Amino acid sequence: MVSAWPLLPGNLLEPNGYRMTTSLSLASELERIASAIETDASATSQISLTGIAEKIARNLGVKSDEVALMGVSTRWRHLHFLVPESLKQVGFIPLSSTSAIAARTARESRPDIINNFAGVRHATVFEGVKISGETSEIIQKMISAPILSGDKVVGVIQISRKGPSPGHAGPDFSADDLGKVLALCKPLGKLLQHLAGES
């Protein structure tokens, strides 16, 4: 029995993680989960970052493989993938990289909307990895934002739209989309501090 869960009104636990209520916004729900973990560290075993990424995907109208969460390793000075699972073992992104958008986001602690992503110089090694056995598609559009714990960057969230062309990938990301992502960055920072650990 996890004593912290009563802090989350109307929550339902599923075998593979936590199902969020529909009555609260995603950002508010992430805040509540982070508070529950702070109260009872054993609650971390009930939380799935993959499940959270799926909720973020639904909230932003993208596919689950179009959400990436990365943690910052201050020890090794790199970013490592937390979600998608299939990218965890592929490698890491040095924070010093001049071609990786995620590294720039972490270094400068500044969000970006890039609606012509395929035309921008960027690292492509992770883009070619097949996720869930599907054919890999080119990232056409992206939001990249720092995940913060206080003033410290502890991770990066990237939301993308993939497809053979910008038109097939879906609509451009808007300032409203960026606002939704930024609202998630602070509660995600609290979660990553507990769930990702230092590597």
Image (spheres, grey):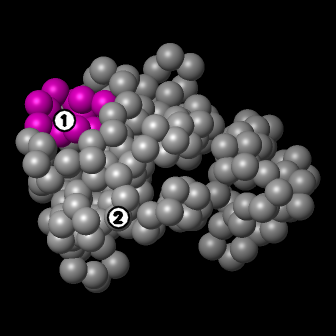
Where is residue 24 drawn, in percent x and y?
79, 51
Q: Secondary structure at mark 1?
A: strand
Q: Quadrant of residue 124?
A: bottom left
Residue 45 drawn above or below residue 112: below
Picture disc at residue 94: 1
Residue at 73% x, 43% y is 28
Which numbered disc, 1 or 2, marks the residue that appears first in the sequence? Answer: 1
The reply, left or right, for residue 131 in relation to residue 174 is left
Q: Nearer the viewer, residue 169 or 5?
A: 169
- Give the residue type that dot 1 points to: Pro
The residue carrying pointer 1 sits among few (fewer than 14), some (14 to 19) or many (20 or more) residues within 10 Å by Cα, namely: some
Q: Disc 1 to disc 2, how far (Cα)?
A: 30 Å
The reply, left or right, for residue 56 in relation to residue 62 is right
Q: Nearer the viewer, residue 82 or 44?
A: 82
Q: Quadrant of residue 168?
A: bottom left
Quadrant into which the C terminus falls: top left
- Give the residue type that dot 2 points to: Gly
Quadrant into which the N terminus falls: bottom right
Residue at 69% x, 76% y is 15
Residue pointed to by mark 2: 170
Q: Is residue 171 magenta?
A: no
**First to last magenta residue range:** 95-105
Evaluate whether residue 104 shows in this view: yes
